[in-house]
Image (cartoon, rainbow, N blue to C red):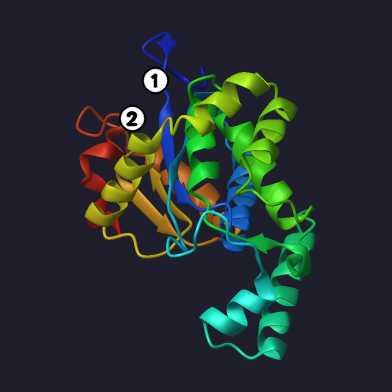
Amino acid sequence: MAGEAFGQSAPAMVVDIWSDIACPFCYLGDTHLALALEHFPHRANVEVRYHSYLLMPELAADTKIGMNELLASKRGMPPEQAAAMNSQISERGAAVGLDYRMQDAIATNTRAAHRLSHFAATRGKQHEMMIRLFEAYFSEGQFVGDYEVLATLAEEVGLDRAEALTALETGAHEAEVDADLAQAQQLQITGVPFFVFDGKYAVSGAQPVEGFVQALETAWSTRSGSGQPGSSRSGSAAAAR
């Protein structure tokens, strides 16, 4: 029977994702993975787990700057080039139902949003929280550096607003964010999105849906006692890059 091993439900195959909510390709890659999972017969036995990555750690927590302006000032990119690049991303997103409004995105330090993601994980809502954060950032132009805004987003995915706000204000889950960043360095991750399938196979970038289907099938077909689900935290995925 599909999804079972020796008459019992097979343990979950974990897909670990390093991403940043300020990364448009992370939003796109996450969506492509979700579409791939719709075609994967063992979907019920797959657990998606998110890890923090900061693309712009140098930005202060209270920074509020437009995406085009950021690319022009911080990356030395001409405004016309920045606008053209963002337009291309918007077109790719629209093809899979995403509404990118890059001209409205407010760039800031995303550490607080990542802490909220880890808070949501303790309540079994990490995936919903990450999707809501992507939407707020890229489609709604919300300032995700504001605790009140983040708490409201948490409430919208079914979390307790007061608990979320307390977690943000008290600095909860800083250790989890730092652990993710340290592991990313250990695995030599220099760009996101970065996916690790079953602790053994790594895929970098917003691959097409077919690429994720292949990765899922390969990881599932080669499962063995030597590669237990979730083993990506051991660093075994480094060799798969």
The percent position of residue 107, horizontal first and vertical second, equals: 62, 62
Q: Nearer the viewer, residue 63 or 234?
A: 63
Image point (72%, 83%), residue name: 84
Image point (35%, 65%), residue name: 190
Which residue type does callout 2 highlight? Pro
Which residue type does callout 1 highlight? Pro
Q: Are marks 1 and 2 in contact (CB under 8 Å)?
A: yes
Ranked by sequence position, the earlier of labels 1 and 2 is 1
Q: Is residue 159 visible?
A: no
The percent position of residue 189, horizontal first and vertical second, equals: 33, 59
- For label 2, the residue is 229
Decide: few, some or many residues near mark 2? Use Cα within 10 Å; few <14, some 14-19, many ≥20.
Answer: many
User: Considering the numbered disc 2 on the image, is that residue within a helix, a strand or a loop?
Assistant: loop
Q: Nearer the viewer, residue 96 or 26?
A: 26
The C terminus, quarter of image: bottom left
Cα separation between marks 1 and 2? 7 Å
Q: In the orientation shown, which residue stands out farthest toward the top?
A: 7
- For label 1, the residue is 11
Decide: few, some or many residues near mark 1? Use Cα within 10 Å; few <14, some 14-19, many ≥20.
Answer: some
Image point (57%, 31%), residue name: 41
Image point (33%, 49%), residue name: 181
The percent position of residue 80, horizontal first and vertical second, equals: 72, 89
